[in-house]
Image (spheres, helix red, strand yellow):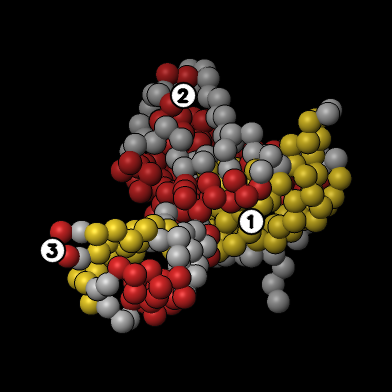
């Protein structure tokens, strides 16, 4: 069995009286895309900085690519691509020169590949970094994170400031990295981004992991929105729904002597199918929940 790319046991970080991370347990498999979801202040950035030894834990232990980040030093960091959430690029050096500088620092960088990444992201490398827009600074940050083909990518809010077309190109880059064997850890409060990319996600709230599951499980755990148009007797329909634990659904009269059934259906739809089996169903919509709905529900439960 392979060693997880990231392993955390009881990881805790305090800043004085404030607990930014509280007893976090994680095991991120190699070759996966792992999302960390949470609002600002949930602890996403603190978690990533602990993995990179930019911060030291107050308690607990973490391993990155099989090593303690504190002892791994420069050799370990050369195997990681990092995009910080607050990327500050100033000065008159053009993007091309900055990539060259970063390549010399890290070593083992194909600058031709860096140029290819810049072209894919639509990044102009001749302009001074300090004069780039937020979106173009973000593109430059993505190029430096990907350009040495790292084993682990740690990306804090990677699509911040990017237009939708460039966001899609980033999605392709992340998938290509995963398909080549790299592990991608990304944080976001843009839930659709995690839904599209990640295999598994941890939901953070106030420094604690309130749910750890596959994206499919997160989405399927939320209540689905039901709207159905049915022929039949109202009392009989009420009884059939109640027998399946669906008595909270609203049944109302509709034109042409029909009935509407509306409300939220939690969990599996088997009970709903059984309840409606004895009636003529004219129309039925059971809308699959989006990830945002699932996560907001988890936040409420965590309160």
**Residue lying farthest to the front in this orientation:** 235
Q: Position of residue 68 (x, y in %)?
A: 80, 52
Q: Residue at x 84, y 50 (%)?
A: 60
Q: Is residue 187 above or below residue 128?
A: below
Dividing the picture into quadrants, the one containing residue 246 is bottom left
Which of label 2 and label 3 is nearer to you?
3
Q: Which residue is mark 2?
A: 129
Quarter assignment of residue 275: bottom left
- The location of residue 116, given as percent across then percent down, is 38, 47
What is the distance, in whole Å, between disc 1 and disc 2 at their CAs? 39 Å
Q: Which residue is denoted by mark 3 in the rendering?
A: 256
Disc 2 to disc 3, C-alpha distance:
67 Å
Q: Earlier in the sequence, mark 1 or mark 2?
A: 2
Tell me the residue at 20%/59% (across/down): 254
Q: Position of residue 201 (x, y in %)?
A: 57, 56
**Mark 1–mark 3 CB contact (< 8 Å):** no
Q: Helix, strand or loop at disc 3?
A: helix
Which label lies toward us, 1 or 3? Answer: 3
Q: Report the front residue among 102 and 188.
A: 188
> Which badge, 2 or 3, is on the more N-terminal residue?
2
Mark 1 or mark 2, whichever is nearer to me: 1
Quarter the C terminus occupies: top right
Query: Residue at (83%, 29%) from the top-left corner?
Result: 17
**Is residue 1 in view?**
yes
Element at label 1: strand
Q: Residue at x 39, y 36 (%)?
A: 162
**Residue projecting furthest to the right:** 59
Viewed as shown, does residue 116 lie left or right of 108?
left
Q: Quadrant of the N terminus?
A: bottom right
Alpha carbon separation for disc pair 1 and 3: 46 Å
The residue where tag 1 is placed is: 211
Q: Which mark is residue 226?
A: none
């Amino acid at each position: 069995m392979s060693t997880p790319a990231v392993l955390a046991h009881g990881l805790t970080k305090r800043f004085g009286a404030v607990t930014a991370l509280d007893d976090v347990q994680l095991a991120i498999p190699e070759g996966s895309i792992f999302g960390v979801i949470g609002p600002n202040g949930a602890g996403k950035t603190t978690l990533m900085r602990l993995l990179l030894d930019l911060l030291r834990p107050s308690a607990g232990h973490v391993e990155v690519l099989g090593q303690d980040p504190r002892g791994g030093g420069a050799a370990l960091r050369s195997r990681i691509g990092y995009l910080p959430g607050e990327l500050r690029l100033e000065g008159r050096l053009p993007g091309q020169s900055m990539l060259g500088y970063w390549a010399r620092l890290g070593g083992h960088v194909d600058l031709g590949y860096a140029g290819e990444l810049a072209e894919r992201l639509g990044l102009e490398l001749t302009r001074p970094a300090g004069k780039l827009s937020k979106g173009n600074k973000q593109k430059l940050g993505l190029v430096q994170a990907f350009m040495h083909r790292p084993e682990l990518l740690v990306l804090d809010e990677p699509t911040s400031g990017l237009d939708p077309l460039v966001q899609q190109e980033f999605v392709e880059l992340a998938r290509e990295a995963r398909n080549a064997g790299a592990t991608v850890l990304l944080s976001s409060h843009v839930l659709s981004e995690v839904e599209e990319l990640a295999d598994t996600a941890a939901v953070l709230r106030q420094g604690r992991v309130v749910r750890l599951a596959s994206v499919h499980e997160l989405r399927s755990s939320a209540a689905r929105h039901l709207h159905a148009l049915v022929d039949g007797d109202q009392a009989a329909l009420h009884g059939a729904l109640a027998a399946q634990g669906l008595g909270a659904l609203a049944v109302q009269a509709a034109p042409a002597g029909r009935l509407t059934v509306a409300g939220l259906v939690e969990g599996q739809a088997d009970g709903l199918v059984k309840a409606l089996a004895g009636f003529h169903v004219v129309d039925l919509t059971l809308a699959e929940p989006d990830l945002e709905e699932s996560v907001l529900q988890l936040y409420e439960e965590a309160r």
